[in-house]
Amino acid sequence: MSEAHYHEDHGAVAGAPLVELVDVRAAYGTIEVLHGVNLSVPQGSVVALLGPNGAGKSTILKVISGLLPPTSGEVRLAGRMVNGASADELARIGLCTIPEGRGVFPNLTVRENLWMATMAGVPLAQVEEIAYARFPRLGERRKQLAGTLSGGEQQMLSMARALSVNPSVLLLDELSMGLAPLVVANLYEIVAQVSQEGVSILVSEQFARTVLGIAQYAAIVLHGNITRVGTPAELEDELSAAYLGS
Amino acid sequence: MQTFLQYTILGLALGGAYFIAASGLVVTYTTSGIFNFAQGAIAMLAVFTYWQFRWGWGWPAPLALLMVLGILAPLLGAVLYQVVMKNLRGTSEVTKIIVSIGVMLGLQALATWVWSPTSSTPRQFQKFFGPNAFAHFGSLRVPWHIIISFIIAIAIAVGIRFLFVRTRSGVAMRAVVDDPELLQLNGGRPERLAMISWAGGSFLAALAGILIQPMIGSAMSAGALTLLVIDAFAAAMFGRLRSLPRTFMGALIIALTTTYVVAYFPSKWTWSSSFRNSLPMIFLFIILLVLPQDRLRGATVLRLRERFRMPSIRTAWIAGLTMMIVVFCLKVIMAKTGVNTLTLALTFAIIALSLVLLTGFAGEINLAALSFGAIAVMVVYHFGISGTGTEARTTLWGILLAAVVTALVGALIALPALRLRGLYLALATMAFGVFISRMVLTERTEREIFGLKFTLFTSGQLAIPRPKIGPIDFNGQDAFLFLCAGLFVAIGIGMVYLRHSGYGRRLTAMKDSPAASATLGMSVVRLKLSIFMMSAAIAGIGGVMMAAQVGTVNSDRFDIFLSLALAMITVVGGIGYVSGALFAGIFLIAFIEALNLMLKKFAVDYSSLEAIFMFFISAVTVLPATIGITMGKNPSGAVSDIVEGMNKVKQSKPLMITVIGLEAAIWALTATEVITNWHFVILTFANLILVPIVGGKFLMARAMRGVPKPVPPELIGIDRPFTDEDLAAMDQALNLDGVVIPSSTTVREEPANASA
């Protein structure tokens, strides 16, 4: 992906995009929250969506995952337009989304949570094997209700799903929310490894430091628009000025 | 020993059937978060359908079973979900309860319509393999039907447990309740799972009904059968709507206790059969009392679709005055029967006010408003009447005492509400209502308590005279009409005052978030107790007025189904509004009555079309329920729609003058008997509904051109999208003129400007 260059006018990363948003608008009821977003996630790269609370990062991920149909524009997955496809259809063809908060079912056990991940096609035995190998702690607690796990363990469980279903695209929403810095660093290490296996990853974050260490590109989201796209190095100054504050 | 075994086996089988019904509740609640009050009605409908196939048309049993259990029942469940329940996402607990009660009342009306209860031959429902098929265990004869019922129950228990724990679809059904979106992100299909579970729940209800009916052995009745399966609610609650083994245990305990009561209570105790009948409800109430505080699943809805605007005190006074004038004008032109109906409607509206206060203002639910009325009526009958014969009058003290007693009973019923809310409270009040009608209102034997001879519900009829307050005698129908109208207006205005007071704001805060209220230092317990007592007292007063209007009341007047219908229609009318209560009374009593009269008149006048009009008369019985079911589409209630319509009239002077002028003319013509009352009704409808629409097209377009409907600032963005003008207006209001909307690079400088 090193040849990929970036166009200022479109705010898009060119290359061989696996996920592509073209002039996407989206609204909750009558309130428009995305005002024409253009974005590309090249194959095998990590793209970070950065921006303050309420900027529209989660909404962008919701639109891609199929939970929120866009009001106009195009969402493309591997070149195919997928506007109007439901979230479960997209999940079954290889899009894995870890939603904001903890992506677990609190009233199901750890094992049952992993069982739900098998709907994307990977058999349970394999899912469990990958999950427990990566996170031995989950293996010890396979019969425990997910709601009784600690925050970090819950995030491990949702990451375990992402690891084991073998997705081609991974969407991560606010992975670090409410977690200890050490746990966050640990999780991002895993994200980096996943990306090395060729998975394209789009990750939204409010706190940019950790994610910028592993992201190839970053996009700044403000007021429902993508205002800047570039490599972390290119955006360094702007980031601290525009959004990180001091 | 023989008796013990016989009854134990019967109890086990009955428990099995209760469990099947309860497990259906658990399945649907688990996947959709909706507690299906219609479960009993589905069972009832299945029993009638099966009877029709099996004995009405003489089909063989397997074919009839396949048709009912294999096809019709699951289909009904699936259709219910797709058409009705699916729309309930994001609505409040109250709406969910009311809609499923609507389905229950609808199915019941449907069954009564198709299978007239006054059929010449009582319908008998037989056990499987006929009434004489017994298995012999030594000296013990057990009907095969009983054995089969118990075996099926165990099979169902094992089957459901297997489904929910050992199959991916079953686990996914549990996952749907936790987080349907997340399941979708996993690749699951929540809607399909919920639909399947409703089909399954409906199948289980039907199965339970077909098993229970022959065990009871009485002739089939729609109401009794519906309530019978409601007994299973207690079992479902015992398992806290989650645990199947506990549900099974609960079902067995309830069924065994009831059969032992039948077996061992001395037959000279006149109340033991009432006690047996109300036992499941007593269980339900106790279970709700001792249930540990539980975070109800699906109870936390972030954004509710309903919205109530609070009328100002001035509006309330104007509305009250208008209502008194309208009542007077109506009285002048109405026939005596019409005045009777209108008065009765107003008494029901007063009872409905208690629901507006409790549910609309405080977010608590009472499904047995009329039962409080029944208690008040009993108090008045025993302690509040002076004089005899035609001189008998209800005293003011009698009414006040009745209000106090019902308030105290209300406090007692509120006990579960202190810790629980929503669904559990609805069930507790419903249990109370069924208990009152099964246990108290059937109490006709004279008893001696502390040397005082006493009959609770003397000879099943209580005569309640009209009140005399001070020197004013309200015995005449007109005087009583104005008393009821005045009472409604007084309580209604009082409620608006209350809503505007600090107490009213605390109520709203509690409705929105009990937790937040408690952390702000409010005593949620005292609030809940006081509001429940107040509401019960209003229901009591309304009940006394209702009885005084009817003259002599029997227990049917306080039927639990009537309470449910009243609650449903009040929610339809708009549970947050005083006018919603008026809507409920008028609709449930006067409108249905008028519609019936009109259709009957037409059937006589146009005898060639009689069949069609008779069909419509039957259809009217299903009407209230049908309207209740549509609540999912408009959770704010019908009154808010009417008010929106009326706003058009209010905003256009020429239109308002036209409507009022026309109405006055119509009234004058009727009062001078130039046109009949029928014409009055039809013309009034046309005037109030058509004129604003038609007139609106011409006048409004001109008057309102370029003037969009003003939206209050807090609703901008919800009712219509934000515009740059809105932003500018807000900036100006907040003294933020000249502040540039932050863009990527200049963000840091802004806060300084904004605070300046």
Image: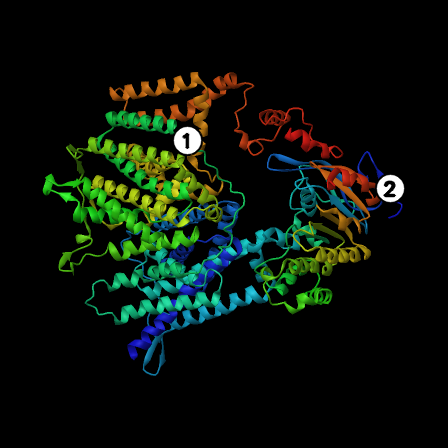
Where residue B184 appears, as percent x and y from the top left, is: 63, 52
Residue occupied by mark 1? B311
Where residue B395 appears, as percent x and y from the top left, is: 17, 40
Instruction: State which chain disc 1 sits on.
Output: B
One can see residue B218 in this view: no
Residue at image coords 74%, 32%: B746
Where residue B678 appears, as percent x and y from the top left, is: 30, 27
Looking at the image, residue A195 sits to the left or right of residue B84; the answer is right
- The three-letter amino acid code for the residue at tag 1 is Pro
- Judge if badges 1 and 2 mark residues of a common chain: no
One can see residue B593 in this view: yes
Instruction: State which chain disc 2 sits on.
Output: A
**Category of crowding for the residue at label 2, using alpha-carbon neighbours closer than 10 angstroms: few (below 14), some (14–19), many (at least 20):** few
Looking at the image, residue B10 sits to the left or right of residue B469; the answer is right
Seen in the picture, residue A200 relative to A138 is either above or below; the reply is above
Distance in Å between CA atoms under marks 1 and 2: 61 Å
Seen in the picture, residue B149 relative to B424 is either above or below; the reply is below
| Mark number displayed over residue A5 | 2
Determine the secondary structure under disc 2.
loop
